[in-house]
Amino acid sequence: MMREGTGSRLVVAASGPSSPGLRGRGMEPEASDEELMQAVAGGDGEAFAVLLRRHLPTVRAIGWRMLGSAEAADDLAQEVFLRIWQAPEKFDAGRGPFRHWLARVGANAAIDRLRERKVQSLDDDADGGGQALADTLADPQPDPEAQAVRVQHLRRLREAVARLPERQRLAISLAHDLGHGNMEIAEIMGVSVEAVESLLARARRTLKERLRQELVDASASRSTASRHEDGAR
Amino acid sequence: MSGQVDRMEISAFRRLLDVHGSDMARWPEEARVQAQALLLSDARARRLLAEARALEDLLRADAPPPEGDLAQRIMARVMAGDAVQQGGEMTQGRQPVSVRRVRDHRRRRMMTPWWAAAPLAASLLLGVWLGLSGALAPVEQVLLADAADDLAFIMEVAAPAEETEGELL
């Protein structure tokens, strides 16, 4: 059995009728990323499918934050994973873990795309970006008014993030979307920890300045929710 | 150890929030102890912490929508041996070993020359004529039927194969 979240259809697709499969070669689906990449270098589609399932959200998260749309994030993920499939030898396990290398590949591809098309204006979101935002809310509000406020906050957040310099935006994505610590971010971005701290500090300060009112509202809402929870106890 | 904690300035607290975020587990230990003492005594510090948490909540709420069938689409492109655009140049497509094997077999089949079947077809036509003319014994007619089967097999192998990638998906 594949681990949870890995589509069996994909595994069948990738293994083909004559492939012994990961398990047949003594390689469990829980194999490390580095072991899987070694198999991918030998043309193992099944190993690639496991890596894809495992790390697709990482590349999409970077694309989402850097490029500002789900479509762009999906395109980026396709490009990155096809590149990995076609040139797996570019990964050198001796130079760090796969997930750091992958984040670096994703980040570089995102920055390339940004430089090709410049920053997409969120104001050009002609089909009602509010609805698109509402659809993506992780925690939709039952109250339509609260929902509208939340959508407005997220719109302002995206505008503020989109105006950050590329490297600050990337540092924010690696810290908040992928949960990396400052040392890991330094490794991924190929800069010193001090440089990462500076990037993050400037980015967070700028976002707080640009989102002052939204953050005041969100803090108030958080306090209210917290009081309600206390009252319920 | 006196148990005395040095007082942290609010500017230092703000700087630590900007550098490390609101999760104090990620802060240097000494700073964490000082910050906790400051939070107990200074409303401004509590407000700054709430502001940092609100920003992180917003960032967390702004997650990408579900990926749908993206993984399947990428695998389909891998199976099809799609090339990818890199810096204005197309890279060579690459397929999984199992798919390459199927494709190579299919290519060999497609490359079987039509003229390889020509002598057999000629002898078959001669045999049919001999059979119809009553010149062949029954056993010879059986051999003739076998030859017809062989010809049909060769023609089938020589015919272009239908695209059947879907079978592998």
Image (cartoon, rainbow, N blue to C red):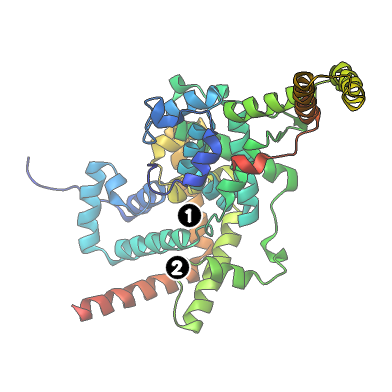
Indicate which disc residue A205 carries: 1
Residue B65: where, in percent of width, then height?
54, 60
Can the viewer see residue B114 in this picture?
yes
Q: Residue A215 carries which label?
A: 2
Q: Is residue B115 above or below residue A69?
A: above
- For mark 1, give the secondary structure: helix
Residue A132 screen position, x and y as percent:
60, 68
**Up/down of B14 relative to B109, above or below:** below
For the point 90% across and 27% down, the residue is B132
| Residue A223: quadrant of the picture | bottom left
Circle 1 chain: A
Q: Residue at x 50, y 28 (%)?
A: A19
Pick the quarter of the image with the C terminus of chain A. bottom left
Q: Residue at 35% of width from left, 64% of height from top?
A: B50
Q: In this view, does A129 lie to the left or right of A20?
A: right
Q: Nearer the viewer, residue A192 or A147?
A: A147
Which dot marks residue A82? none
- Whether residue A111 is visible: no
Front residue (pair A140, B163)? B163
Comparing marks 2 and 1, which lies closer to the viewer? Answer: 2
Q: Within 10 Å of the Cα at label 2, are there few (<14), some (14-19), or many (20+) other Cα atoms? A: many
Give the structural element (helix, strand or loop) at label 2. Answer: helix
Q: Residue at x 90, y 21 (%)?
A: B130
The amino acid type, in three-letter code, at marker 1 is Arg
Q: Quadrant of the N terminus of chain A?
A: top left
Q: Measured along the vertical axis of the image, is residue A200 above or below residue A48?
A: below
Whichever of labels 2 and 1 marks the residue nearer the N terminus, that label is: 1
**Mark 1 closeness class: few <14, some 14–19, many ≥20 residues within 10 Å:** some
Depth order, front residue of A36/B3: A36
